[in-house]
Image (spheres, grey):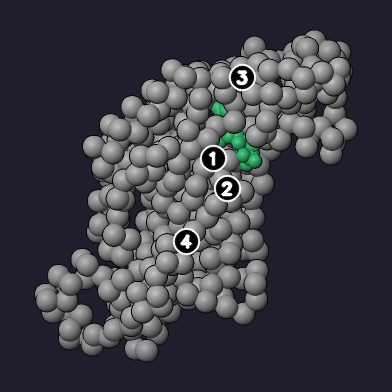
Amino acid sequence: MGNLRFLTSGESHGRGLIGLIEGIPSGVPLTSADIDQDLKRRQGGYGRGGRMNIESDHAELISGVRWGKTLGSSISILIENRDWKNWHEGMAADPAYTNSIKPVTRPRPGHADLAGALKYDHRDMRNILERSSARETAMRVALGAIAKKFLSGFGAHIGSYVVQIGTQRSAGSNRQSVKDLIKTFEEAERSPVRCPDPDASRKMIRLINKAIKSGDSLGGVFEVFVTGLPPGLGSHIQWDRKLDGRLAQAVMSIQAIKGVEIGLGFGMAQRPGSEVMDEIHYRNKHEIRSAKYEKQNSKSEGGLETGFYRKTNNAGGLEGGMTNGMPVIIRAVMKPIPTLRKPLMSVDIQTKKPFEAAYERSDVCAVPAAAVVAEAMAALVTADAFLEKFGGDSLKETSRNFDSYKTYLKKF
Ligand SMILES: Cc1cc2nc3c(=O)[nH]c(=O)nc-3n(C[C@H](O)[C@H](O)[C@H](O)COP(=O)(O)O)c2cc1C
């Protein structure tokens, strides 16, 4: 990340989460309501644990915004933890409260607990789990909402939907038409598991109920899309400029995400090249305008009407590390939630004795929420690449640069 930088801070049961983002131009309309709606989406989804009932997240804009518009300075956000009142001694900064709660000495398999304790020399693994917890993703979603707001002013739309929970799959979208993607997204928003197919949704809920009963947990697969981007974001020039790599890293960095694909992804392995590459077609100015092509446009997209278009989108909108004008499609797999009611074996780091891990209130499935977090990460990386290409200290300046590129593309 170069043009847009962000950091998050905060422990799961600390006072709250703090986020800071720098590089958003001045003049972008922004209110805390823009952020809160995504925070709410992250908190939802069938299969969440008790915590989600305690927390009703609200983003307080602390700096960088005045009278509903960004100033161009760093934007900082505070999300308070509602149950701080129960933890203000156990998580206090003040040494007077040392040892006010029992240390955590039993590492949970699938968590950062043991590796973190060894690395940071902690004998109380609360010092690790408080930060490794996915509570941190609330702030990523908040910062991502700012990036989304910025990008939406340029016609980009970011969304996600769940395509698999446990063994239950759903078809998802055809991935090449903006209209279809947005329709799929809207259908997913109505589902308790954020899956666009109502029949698959019901079956997914049944699977989650089964996991709840048996004390187990479930993972799954979701897709994130970004539509409306111009060709040429990212670059083929160096490894760290390639947008596919940057998006994959950002999504992989989300807690419990273990695989990321772009476009057809792993599905490319079993097909010959002739069935994978998206052939390039062209339509001229008059054809673009004609109703015939408007209609065709609902099945295939070219991006900002350059004239070049594809009938398929197996590449997921990225070729050579650059956007090609087609919708960007990212798919990711989330592992099952590691905290289980059904005991897992571990070893106490103090006594070195084996034990069955104790159960703490936990999600059973958080794939729908992880998809919302991935939207935020995709938005942040995309906004960074957008600013890299178009620059601008004010929204007006970015718009001028963007419009000039659009004019150039039309003449290309
Ligand atoms: C939105 C979301 C919610 C999560 N909720 C829980 C949870 O309630 N309990 C749990 O044990 N893990 C949960 N996780 C997963 C863990 O945070 C994650 O598996 C753990 O930090 C270890 O990191 P790793 O899986 O990336 O290696 C959640 C992850 C996400 C993205």
Q: CA distance from mark 1 to mark 2?
A: 7 Å
- Snapshot quadrant of residue 348: top right
Q: Residues within 10 Å of mark 2 (few under 14, many from 20)?
A: few
Closer to the chain start, of discs 1 and 3, is 1
Q: Amino acid at mark 3?
A: Pro
- Indicate yes or no: mark 3 CB to ligand 1 under 8 Å: no
Residue at left offset 47%, top offset 75%: 319
* Mark 1 in CB contact with mark 3 (< 8 angstroms): no
SS assignment at label 2? strand
* Mark 1 in CB contact with mark 2 (< 8 angstroms): yes
* Mark 4 in CB contact with mark 2 (< 8 angstroms): no
In this view, the mark in front (2 or 3): 3
- Indicate yes or no: mark 4 CB to ligand 1 under 8 Å: no
Which residue is label 2 attached to? 258
SS assignment at label 3? loop
Q: Is residue 56 at least partly visible in the picture?
A: no
Residue 357 percent coordinates (x, y): 67, 19
Q: Amino acid at mark 2?
A: Lys
For residue 266, the mark is: 4
Q: Amino acid at mark 4?
A: Phe
Q: CA distance from mark 2 to mark 3?
A: 23 Å
For residue 335, the mark is: 1
* Mark 2 in CB contact with mark 3 (< 8 angstroms): no
Q: Residues within 10 Å of mark 3 (few under 14, many from 20)?
A: some
